[in-house]
Image (spheres, rainbow, N blue to C red):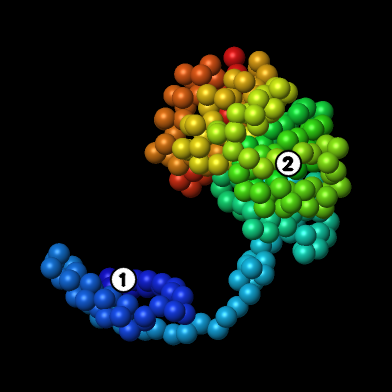
Amino acid sequence: QVETVKITAYYPESADIEAITKQVNERLAELTDFGLETGDIHLATQELVEEDWAENWKQYYKPIPIGENLLVLPKWEPEPEGNTRRVLKLDPGLAFGTGGHATTRMCLELLEEAVRPGCQVLDLGCGSGILAIAALCLGAGQAVGVDIDPKAVDVAYENAALNGIGKDRYTVRAGDILTDRALEAELGGERYPLVLANIVADVILALIPSLPRLLRPGGTVICSGILDNRLAGVREALQAHGLEVLETEGREEWRCVVARRE
């Protein structure tokens, strides 16, 4: 069976396409040195018409039902007829968090089980604000979001407003809790029953030593954004800092861990 492989690369208008094409052809020819039969190779270039990439992606972002109760609804989409789910309106803009990625979906599904009426939530690496806003929609009383990207502050507040949530219930801060001790102390002054961290394994590992200062005794943390080959290290670090691993969820190559402060 003959397999066809297509590789597409994009270059800026200023790039020397002739030189790049020559180099690619030379490298392709070298593949035979490794005993690889490349078959017929067709190399083509074309100039792309400039598009509004910041807006065009929206045509692919549709309503997403998540778990038993939530429907993530892009703000430009109408609510589906006959919908019985709790609607979470969202415009992620340039911030991470649409609800479509496996890491975010797992967090949202676990939130349905973890949120208690009136509880307080801390969302580390809040991005678009989707997790904290979902928690508030599911019955949490107050939420705080933190992100190293200052743009996330405005995006998260705007998304909260789309859902009728004001700054009296939701606070967003820009900063790095790993390096800003004043910010860590401020956040740690109010220990939370639920902490969310949908980031990446390296950042989660760096955050874990701070979790006992952020979580109430018996409090829960949901960590996501962990690749399967990093799972063991995250579980070990949580346990080493007095957190009991309760469950692990997996989807595609991603893992999400729920742990409790003892």
Where residue 164 appears, x then y in whole percent?
86, 47
Residue occupying the point 68% across, 28% down:
187
Where 245 falls versus 92 (above or below)? above
Where 12 falls versus 249 (above or below)? below
In the rendered view of the protein, which quadrant contains the C terminus? top right
Residue nearest the viewer, comparing 58 with 85:
58
Amino acid type of the residue tagged 2 in the rendering: Val
Residue occupying the point 76% across, 29% down:
120
Judged from the image, the secondary structure of the residue bearing numbered disc 2 is strand
What residue did someone put label 1 on?
Answer: 3
What residue did someone put label 2 on?
Answer: 172
Q: Earlier in the sequence, mark 2 or mark 1?
A: 1
Where residue 193 appears, x then y in whole percent?
70, 24
In the rendered view of the protein, which quadrant contains the N terminus? bottom left
Residue nearest the viewer, comparing 181 with 260:
181
Residue nearest the viewer, comparing 59 with 27:
27
Residue occupying the point 39% across, 83% down:
45
Amino acid type of the residue tagged 1 in the rendering: Glu
